[in-house]
Each structure stands twice: as C-alpha cells, then as structure tokens.
Image (cartoon, coloured by chain):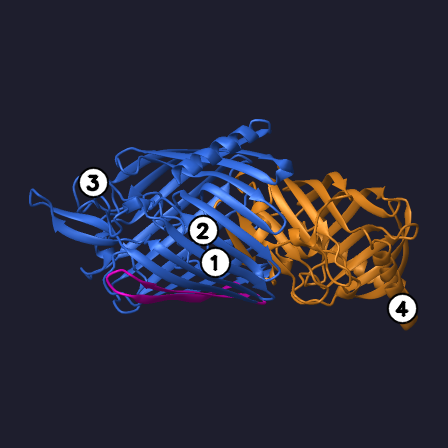
Chain colours: A orange, B blue
Amino acid sequence: MISIHKAVSLLLIFLMGSTYGVASETDNTKALTIAKERKQRDTGWGTTEATVTMVLLNGQGQEAQRELNVKSLEVTDDGDKGLTVFNSPHDVKGTAFLSFSHALEPDEQWIYLPALKRVKRISSRNKSGPFVGSEFAFEDMTSYEVEKFSYEYLGEEEVNGEMCFVLKQTPNYDYSGYTFQKVWIDKSHYRVQKIEFYDKKEALLKVLMPKEYQLYKDKFWRPMRSEMQNVQTRKSTYLITEDINFDTDLLESDFDKNRLKRAR
Amino acid sequence: MKRAFTVCGILTLANASHAEVELSGSAGFEQRYFLQDALYNPQERSYSSAFFMPEIYTQWNGGADTLVVKPFYRIDEHDDERTHGDIREFQWAHYADSWETMVGIGKVFWGQTESLHLVDIINQTDSVESVDGEVKLGQPMVNFNYLTDYGMFSVYALPYFRERTFQGESGRLRPPVAIGDALYESDDEERNIDLAIRWQSSIGDWELGVSAFSGTTREPELVTRLDQDGIPEILPFYAQIDQVGIDVLKVSGAWLFKLESIYRSGQSEDFTAVVTGFEYTKQGLWGTRYGVGVLAEYQYDERDDNFFAIGQNDLMTGLRIIVNDIAGTEVLFGFVQDLEESSTYSGFVEASSRLTANWSWTFNGYFFSSDDIEDPFYFLRRDDHVQFSLEYYF
C-alpha cells in the first residue's frame, strides 16, 4: 500500500515539475509577494482564546479525543506565543504547553506537569516530533512567519471551489521533518486551502485541509476545522474549533513559565 | 498558626460555596511482586494494594481565587504503614498580575535533574508510595510569589513538619528492623517553623534557580540503639539544617544540560552534593514515529554514611523510548552504577500507556545489588520487584 502511495506521489512531483517548469527569478519574487500578502492579511489580531477538540483516527476506525484550550498572542516581527492546556484525557488534565515560536531561531518550549507540579523545558529540536501522538508535528502547530521558508511559485489551481496560488515553500529553519511543503493559497482572501508535506525522502507524507473558514472582526479568517491526513499510514487528526474569542484580556505576561500552574 | 489556617479555610469555603465545583481524580489497583524470598520476617512476596485520590476544585473572582482539595488513601494487603492516608492538597490560591499567594497544604517542585532531586526540599517524600522518591506528602505552607521580568521571587513559611513515611514490619524495602518513630533536634519537634526562599527565571536558553532553606531536614539520619527491652531499634533523626541550592538547565539544540548542587549544614557533617548530566532527544528515529531520549547523570555526595545518600559517586544512565502514539506510551530504562564499589548498582524500568480515555496502566521494575554490607542497597539486595498498576481517571 505504502509503496503505491510513494510511487503516486513521486509521479505527481514529476508531473508537476514538468508542468510548472523551472521557477524563474520573477516567479520567485511573485511567490514571496504572495507569502507576504498572506502574512499581512493576518496581522493585527492581537490575542485569541479558543476551545479546540482534537480527534485522532488511527486508520482502522478507532478514535480518540482531546479537549484543548488554546491561548495565542501575536508578537510583531517574531513568532507568536502560544499556551495550550489539556482538559482531556483525564490523566493529562491540566498539562500545559507553552511555546515562544521564532522565525529562524529555535523555538522556546516548556511543559507543565500538574501531578508533579513541575515545569520542564523541552529541547527545541523536537519540531518534527508528533504533537501528543497526533498527525500534527510541533512545527505544524507554530505560527506562520514569512522568513521561515524560501518560496517558489508553481502556478494556479482550484481547491475547495477557490482559485489558488500554488507555492512551494522550503523550510529555512533547522531540524524540520520536511524537505518542502506545497501550499494552496486562495486568490480571494489569501487563506490556506491546502498544504502538502513532503518527508525527508521527498515523498508525500501528509495533507492538511483547512475547512469551514469564518471571518472575525471583519478581517481575520479562521478555519473551524483542520483535517490532517498522513497518506503513508492512513492516520488522521482533525482539529475542530468549538469556540474562538478575539476580545480576550490576555497579556504578554500570561505567557510565562512561572504562571503555568495557573493554567487550568 | 493553626488558627490562621482554620480561618483561611472557612473563608475560602464560604466564598467557594457560590462557585461551581469540579470533581475529578483517580483510583487504582496495584500488584507488587518481589522476585526473591524475603530477608526479614514477616515480609511477603506479593503485595496487593488499592488507592483513591479524588480532587475537588473550585474557583471564583474569575479564576483569581482557587481552592483545591485533594485527599489520598491507600490500602495495602500486608504493610500497615503503607496503608496510609494523606491530604496531598488543601490549598487556597490567589493570583494577581504580579504576585500570587498560596495558603494551606500543597506541593512545590524545585529543580531540573531526573535521577536525584537535591534542591527540591519543601515537601517530604512519601517513600512507601514509590521507590523512586517522586511521590510527596502534602506540606502545610504560607507561600508568597512575586513575579517580575527578572523571574519569580518566592518566600515560604512552613509551620508543620511531615515525617517521612517508612515501611512497616511486614513491608519490603526496609532495613533489618523497621524504622521507628521520629526524633527531633528542635524542641518544637514537628511544630518548628521552617523558612525557605527561592528565585527562578528563564533567560534565553537558560533556566536558573537559587534557593535557601532553614529548618527541619526532610532527609533524616538513622539512629540505631537498644530500646528499654534491649531490642535494637532504628529511629529517624531530624536535625535543624541550613541549605542553599542552585539548579541550572541549558538548552542546546537536541541537548539539555542539567545541574543541581546543594550545601547543607547542621547534620552530623556539613557537606556538598552535586548531580549533573544531560538529556539528548531525537524524534523520528530511523524514519519511524518513535522518539528516543538518552540520559546520563553523575551523582556526587561528600557524605559517606547516610542511609539515604545513595548517590555518593554514582553514574545514572537511562534510555527513554517515546512511542508517540495516541495512547501516549513511554518506557524509561535506567541503570545506576556506584563508581567506587562495582558490586553496588541498581536498575529500573518504568513503562506507562493509556488504554482508553479513562484507563491507563503502568509497569515498573526495580532491581538492586550490593555485596558491600555498609551500603544501603545491601539491605535491599533481595528486594528486586516488579509492579503493575491499573488506574482509572475521572
């Protein structure tokens, strides 16, 4: 099964390569302009607090759920700060994950273990590791920054009924689990409609489909559902936003390892 | 002091009565099996036990005030001392922007290393609960923390001392005679007021902590003497000590470098102890989902003859396997070698995983060896054991 998928994805890469041709200098400038516009349109949101259900499917029909509370703080000219608290499963209730993501410097991460009352610093090299057993890697959960990638313009394609720019983005940061990603960004609002992740052997590993976009504060689009499928293992993870609030009273000081015990 | 606690308790309960109360917790069944026959009477080979630890939580003032009540009780089939209860937490906390205070019974963790927790001193070890010393008794305290851009400054007043728990006559993992009642240096005994201060901060790739403690030692010295009937008894003696400690962690890519060190005075000898080492983590091993962590920590302690100071000149090596599955499966293998006495070593394995959203299991094994009759492990040389526990979280 896996070998067929690999063969198909390799064939796809080959076909795309021949369709799109070698990217020219002006195409790369265009790709960067699109990436900057994507970031620009999602600037100024400040803080958000969301209730998220994570659904993990193992490919054989078995399902597990996690309930998360996700607080985010926009940091201008750097990666954002995030605080994720687990409400379920019950054995990890109150476990809090704090991250300061950075464009190129290693991210800073801490985990709070409520049973031990212990805050542990985590190695910044775990980017490619799965986030709590899901199909999302740590690097998929951190904020999008233009400088994180180099871009190539691949063309246009329709996804989810939206005409999209297709970009190839290659990580500039260390320890990524991917050689490159392909991103479909819609022309109407510069929202991500699809991302393909290619592993170290340049084989298609995962596909992310953000769905059910909703508009907040007349400016910021958020997908209410993000479906990540691992095409090699057939496992999937869905992130479902139950509730999101843009008018929080969060402060930068709330994103502090010494305040993780307050998270609940 | 006690009255102050009672008043606080009543006030917090009165406030809490208007708020929503959350009930959660865990309960479990545990089976311990010792691989060899016991050295001492009347120890057994097999011990079943069960525990219950509910947690009641409420908050008010929009989460600025919280109250946690977390009692614990275990029933052990044979060991009367392991059949025990504790209030793990009964604490009111008030959180303001730049400060917070906690009053009541609670738990505090200090430090960075894995194989030994030298700096961590606020809570007493509930040593009948687990061999690794990670389980702690609830500590009555008044704690004030001041949070600044330069880290957190903490002050603790600890009005009541908790004796370390020890196995009874029927329990394994004890010296030839079960450890008896506590002796204190302080005339106030367990009512001596202990004090502690700490600063901790994250500075870039560094995690730093500096702490000081003055009061009753958490780690007793054992006194052997004859009781009035001429029968030998072993008693824990709790001296008044002063201790300073530092803990440091440095992140460097996939590496975490860790160090903890203390200087303690007031017991039979003043001493320095250090534990230092690294943890290296690699995800996606050989293209799989698996992650591994490699740990090594060197333990040094100036003391020669404290029963509980086992890390005198020892090296711990460990391997953590992270399966990265939905069940959160992890296995940790460890080996501690005494670098002065080759026959003295110990090994352990700690594995855990989730069965469903509510059920999980742990499997632990601990193995001890020593031919040196001076070494604490000599008494435990036949106490190799495995334990399986099934836990329900609600």
Q: Mark 2 lies on which chain?
A: B
* Mark closer to the chain start, 1 or 3: 3
Query: Circle 2 sits in a helix, a strand or a loop, which is it?
Result: strand
B4 relative to B187 in the view: left or right: right
Name the residue carrying label 1. Answer: B198
How much space separates mark 4 and mark 1, taking CA atoms?
53 Å
How much space separates mark 3 and mark 4, taking CA atoms?
78 Å
The part of the image, by quadrant, that contains residue B344 is bottom left
Name the residue carrying label 2. Answer: B156
Compare residues A161 and B198 and report the one nearer the observer: B198
Over which residues does the magenta segment extend? B252-280
Q: Which of marks 1 and 3 is in front?
A: 1
Q: Which mark is residue B340?
A: none
> Split into 4 quadrants, where in the image is the C terminus of chain A?
top right
Using the image, determine if residue A260 lies above or below residue B81.
below
Find residue B71 and report its horizontal and vertical position in percent. 42, 34
How much space separates mark 1 and mark 3, taking CA atoms?
39 Å
* Mark closer to the chain start, 1 or 2: 2
Q: Label 3 near label 1: C-beta < 8 Å?
A: no
Query: Circle 1 sits in a helix, a strand or a loop, which is it?
Result: strand
Name the residue carrying label 3. Answer: B169
B86 relative to A234 in the view: left or right: left
Find residue A36 and report its horizontal and vertical position in percent. 85, 62
